[in-house]
Image (tube, grey):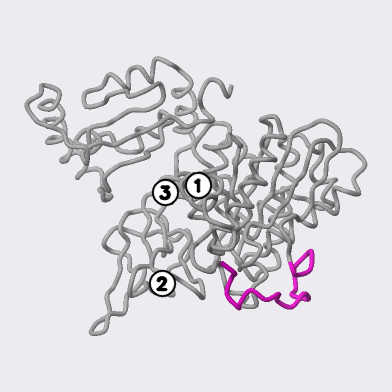
Amino acid sequence: MTPPATDRPRDAATPGRSPPLPFTRLITDLSRGQGPTVICVGGVHGNEPAGIAAAAVVGQKLSDLAQWRGRFLAMVGHVAASNAADPTLRCFERDLNRIVTREEIDTASRTAPAERSPEHAELVELVQRLGAAAEQSGGDATLVDLHTVSSPSPAFAFVEDSIPARRLGLGLGLPLVLGFEEELRGLLVDYATNELGILSLLVEAGTHDDPESVTVHEAAIWTILQHRGLVDDAQRAAGFDVAQRLRAAAGRQAAKTFDIRCRVPVGSPPLEMAESSQAFKRVWKGITTVATRQHPDRTETVRAPADGLLFMPNRQARRRPEDDAFFVIRPVWRRLMWMSASLRRRAWTHRVLAALPGVRRTDAVTLEVDHGVAALMTRDVFHLFGYRVHHSRPTPYQRMPMRALLAIPAIARAVLRAAGLLKRTEREVWVVRRRRLDLPSRG
């Protein structure tokens, strides 16, 4: 299927863009000697060209650098949307960064090329190139997915909550957010990590139309190139103080770690964010007004569904019901991160976890958890031991006193089910699995 008529090149003189339009898939592919591979993908959304520009600048500087090693590959994620005449267009039919799953890839691959949707056409080519690069790297590849946001926010990074990915993310000095992959299915970085085994990271550099977003992305790329051993001195290679630039972009949130508490979709009628709803603003469950929803006969006030910090309020020019309206996040205590890293490396901790009432091991890395126990053993507990929730019933956020009250019937249910006096249904099971990059074979 040919993309709609909006797929016409925008003005090649658009400020902050490099290389000029029209974009092609490949931005740059440079190799020198033996070394690791770093893959950058920009423009997964058509209205986010800053990552494309930054990757091109890094490629230009790297080609002039006398000493470096490895491979630097940079690609455009959504070529057709990035070349669209409308600069606010993110995608044509579906968000490309929500369909990168094995099922969608198989469906797209079985469809004749002329009949593929615009996003399926992009998906097939992107994952083919990504898979080839991962195979050629011999298992030593890193993916950096470059994005921007629709409302003012400190720059931040997202990684899955594995020890190697944490180490990579913390090295940037940006706020590090964990847990997106449990709230959003079909992320490019999630596919790269769990299907291809690639160490992956997503960077949100700033707003779409801020020229500084390009510089922040460039600073992040150089920092990762140094972290992965392609260059020895990121500052010298870049020609500016990359660490200072990242600190400035992070502001007061620099080097802090956060976890997703909940996600709220745009819905229908669409949520309209309140003017006061700014990124990283403190919100309280049921108290803080975050947005409104305009019904035909009334205006609905939407309050925060959890205590924490407001995150990524959506002010896109184009929004669909399934898009993210906002998230609520919470700080993660650094000492808890250290404890978690220690616990998940020890085999006995996983044996103890599997022996708890209401928990059953199904294979070496997967547990089934009775939902009654899960009401007590929240996702936080499984995260502590390095498990990701793959399937669960939605559980609304509760403050600690209410959690304690809910624990009483939860324990009773677990005991009755363990004794065979109360049947368990499939809907009452959580499925949790250890993260691939934390498994002993990864070191």
Q: Nearer the viewer, residue 218 or 183?
A: 183
Determine the CA span between mark 2 and mark 3.
Answer: 19 Å
Above or below residue 163? Residue 117 is below
- Locate residue 434, reporting x and y percent: 43, 29
Q: Quadrant of residue 356?
A: top left
How crowded is the residue under tag 2: few (<14 C-alpha within 10 Å), some, or many (20+)? many
Element under disc 3: strand
Label 2 element class: strand
Q: Are marks 2 and 3 in contact (CB under 8 Å)?
A: no
Q: Earlier in the sequence, mark 1 or mark 3?
A: 1
The residue identified by callout 2 is 273
Quadrant (top left/top right/bottom left/bottom right) for the C terminus: top right
- Residue 238, image x, y percentages: 82, 50
Q: Is residue 8 magenta?
A: yes
Whole-percent x, y for residue 358 in the image = 22, 27
**Residue of label 3:** 260
How crowded pointer 1 is (Cα within 10 Å; few <14, some 14-19, many 20+) is rated as few
371 is within the stretch colored magenta: no
Which residue: 33% across, 54% down?
307
- Amino acid at dot 2: Met
Marks 3 and 1: in contact by CB < 8 Å?
no
| Left or right, residue 317 beside residue 290 | right
Residues drawn in magenta? 1-22
Q: Kindly identify which residue carries mark 1.
A: 106
Give the total of numbered labels.
3
Q: Alpha-carbon distance for marks 1 and 2?
A: 37 Å
Q: Is residue 167 left or right of residue 13?
A: left
Q: Residues within 10 Å of mark 3 (few under 14, many from 20)?
A: many
Q: Quadrant of the N terminus?
A: bottom right
Residue kind at label 3, given as amino acid type: Ile
